[in-house]
Amino acid sequence: MDERLTLLLSRVAGKVRELWVTDGETAYIRDPVFPVIRNRVHAEFCKAMLRSGGDTLVGPILNYVAACQNPDGSWNEVHVNYNEPSALITAFIGDALIEAADRHPHEDALERARDFVLAAERSPGCFLKSAGYTADHLNVDASCGAFLARYAERYDDREARAAASRAAENVVSHQRDGVYPYAVDKGTYPYVFDLPCIHYQGVTIYYLAKTNDVLCDDRIDRSIAEAARWLAAAQRPDGRFDWSGSGLSFACYLSGAYAFAQASFTYASRLDDRYREHADRSLGWLDANVRGLAPRWEPGSWGDLPLSVAAAVKSASLGGYPLRHRAFRFGYGVYREVARRRYSATAETRAFEALSGLLGIRSSTVEPSKNFPDLFMTSEMLDCLSQSMIWGKNT
């Protein structure tokens, strides 16, 4: 598996290098589809390159990233529909700066990131993602906790370590039957999205595992083992997931789910060796489906579309929401089933905007009508797989 993982990382990283733009002492990665330059993409890619031995462009990219930091220590979540300061994105970039601290130090930026993320803890272990998204997202708590744990380890920071412990406790305390729900209160959403989600299950396991690399808490490992059991039960022998039990419409079929799962199963194999098989299944799916940049969604065949529509019916019924919202989720699901089977190098979103308008739904997501090469998914994949290599060596 190690050789296949190394080759996949090299192949995908080579494709991303084609998108780098250098400008003197700085460099950035251009998105081939959307007119945005994402802070998170830079952070994830730099971490992957540093773990793989380094890259001459990591320093210039981090120079660019450091210049994008806000006066309050935050970085913005850059999206097609919004651009606002985010503790989540700040945690990801802070983690990259820790990874790079010995070779490309940005100590002042890192300390200010630490202060901003600590200040985003609005209740014990609950970190505010951003002003526009105020629900308690467990994946956000785990991500902020992972950054603070690593900061605490490097700088012997008791305050950061205590906050990381609270974040982990908040995540673990909300787990039910192995599931980490997407959100556990309403915030600015119209409903509480207390739903199981395959993608965010893997995301939450991944960052909780990174937190516990520092905390070494047996209770956290037991929680991760339960979470991995749920995720493994949703995986088919061919590596694909059964998405019918995943209730978060915008996260269904995301290709990044397979990268988070691969890394999460690799960590979980420390606790139970059977998860090695599930990690290998996830890697096999990635190796077969990611030739350059990762597709936005898991591809599908037209022949199994009726089965996929049936899965969309089941997914839309989860959670007991009002009829109009369930209708939107079903329509969203069918739209996604068609879109992931069609391919384009560009992103056309008018069909989804029309669907949202017809049902009176305000959605912050951008949903092209065709599958497309996604730099965002690709950067997440590189981060997860490079971290998996480290966990695999330590198993």
Image (cartoon, rainbow, N blue to C red):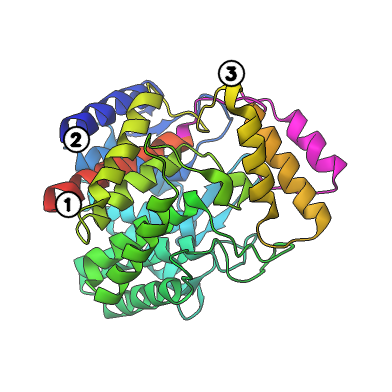
Which residue was labeled with disc 2?
A: 1
Q: Position of residue 53 (x, y in %)?
A: 16, 37
Give the residue at mark 1.
102
Q: In the structure shown, which secondary structural element does the residue marked by tag 2 occupy?
A: loop
User: Could you classify mark 3 by the number of other residues whose Cα lies within 10 Å: few (under 14), some (14-19), or many (20 or more)?
Assistant: some
Q: Amino acid at mark 2?
A: Met
Hey, what amino acid is under mark 3? Ser
Q: 244 left or right of 348?
A: left
- Picture residue at 31% right of the left edge, 45% below the top: 278
The residue at which mark 3 appears reads as 344
Q: Residue at x 13, y 47 (%)?
A: 393
Residues under labels 3 and 2: Cα distance? 31 Å
Q: Quadrant of the N terminus?
A: top left
The secondary structure type at the circle numbered 3 is loop
Residue at point 36%, 57% (across, down): 228
Asked if disc 3 and disc 1 are in contact, CB closer than 8 Å, the reply is no
Q: Is residue 199 left or right of residue 10?
A: right
Nearest the eye: 130 or 62: 130
**Lower sequence index among marks 3 and 1:** 1
Viewer-nearest of discs 3 and 1? 3
Question: Distance of mark 2 from mark 1, alpha carbons?
Answer: 29 Å
Q: Main secondary structure of the magenta part?
A: loop
Give coordinates of residue 195: x percent, y percent: 59, 60
Q: Give the magenta range.
A: 347-375
* Above or below, comparing residue 330 to residue 121 in the picture: above
